[in-house]
Image (tube, rainbow, N blue to C red):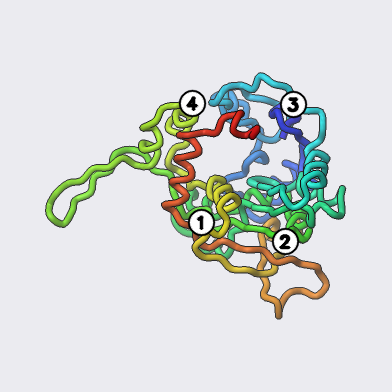
Amino acid sequence: MGRSLTSSPVDSDYPLLNTPKLFQAWETVHGVLPWEGAFAKENDTYEALGNDPTSGDPDRIVRAAFYEGYPNITAQAQRAAEFMVQQVRRYPGEVAIFAAGAMTNVALAVRMDSDFAKNAKSLTIMGGYIDVNLLQTTGSTLQADLNSDINLMIDPEAAKIALTAGMYFCFRLGNAANQVMSTQGISKKLCRWGEVVTRAEFLDEIHEIRNPYTELMYDYYGTEFPFWDETAAAVMIAGSGIVKNSTSFYIDVDTTYSSPSYGNIHAYQEALRPAAQDLRTVEYVLEVDGDLLRQMIKKAVQEPPTCAQWDR
């Protein structure tokens, strides 16, 4: 969130209304989330071990958290929302927007330019789980983490603005983002003929080609989490080519601070949608082609495009 953290234009240090204190107060009433993201309580000991800073000063930096190396370029002075508006105006119908976290900048762009939504090509969002409350009550806290929606809960108001803006096409990656897990190591399988077959797991397959990207992924990705953002990015790129099952419905975001569902989505069919709101439909992805997703990830890190290729 800090302005000095990236070479891209960066805007709000905070969500539209939410703050770490408000978020933590909400947790006191409605229960703690298994993963609190940037709104977890400030922890100097944790940061000293090389972890991302949480709460406190949003411009605070932990250099050790940059496994890929500390950036040596300066952030642009232009604000992110302004940059997005300019690009969408310059290239109407061509700019696909990818949101893998809080949607504060998207909401600001929508409010800055009334034509922003209709001029954007699409909006793809990682987040928006449905009917997962029971999964949060059984098993480990990791299972609860995999089925909670921190991306929207950081800034519920921005999520609602973005999702009701009327983008031409909006993909939601909720439950399907948990479909493909990261795996590592050598697995053994006993075939019915009595033969033991060994095979390398996915991160090991990626590591068969050595470059900075595959090294980073092999050393740091781990096997705790699914390919959340990668799945959403693949859907943005491949669209119907990777989506095996999806459905369309009207969507709303709970922006009632006193609600235990604050920041979660609610879905409606046409006959039951609330008349007092201008809700929009989204394409909600239920299943992706897992094999194709792995192929796309592998190609992206084993054969990364060069700057010359991007400039063509």
Q: Residue furthest front?
A: 312
- On residue 254, which mark appears? 2
Number of numbered discs: 4
The answer for how far apart the CA atoms under marks 4 and 2 are is: 41 Å
Q: Earlier in the sequence, mark 4 or mark 2?
A: 4
Say which element carries label 2.
loop
Which amino acid lies under the numbered mark 2 shown in the image of this protein?
Asp
Q: Can the viewer see residue 258 in this picture? A: no
Which amino acid lies under the numbered mark 1 shown in the image of this protein?
Ile
Q: Earlier in the sequence, mark 1 or mark 2?
A: 1
Up/down of 18 relative to 259, above or below: above
Asked whether 199 or 256 is in front, the reply is 199
In the rendered image, which quarter is residue 255 located in?
Answer: bottom right
Q: From the viewer's perspective, is the residue at label 4 or at label 2 nearer?
A: 4
Q: Earlier in the sequence, mark 1 or mark 4?
A: 4
The quarter of the rendered structure image containing the C terminus is: top right
The answer for how far apart the CA atoms under marks 3 and 1 are is: 34 Å
The quarter of the rendered structure image containing the N terminus is: top right
Q: Residues within 10 Å of mark 3 (few under 14, many from 20)?
A: some
Q: Residue furthest bottom?
A: 271
State left or right for residue 90 relative to residue 140.
right
- On residue 75, which mark appears? 3
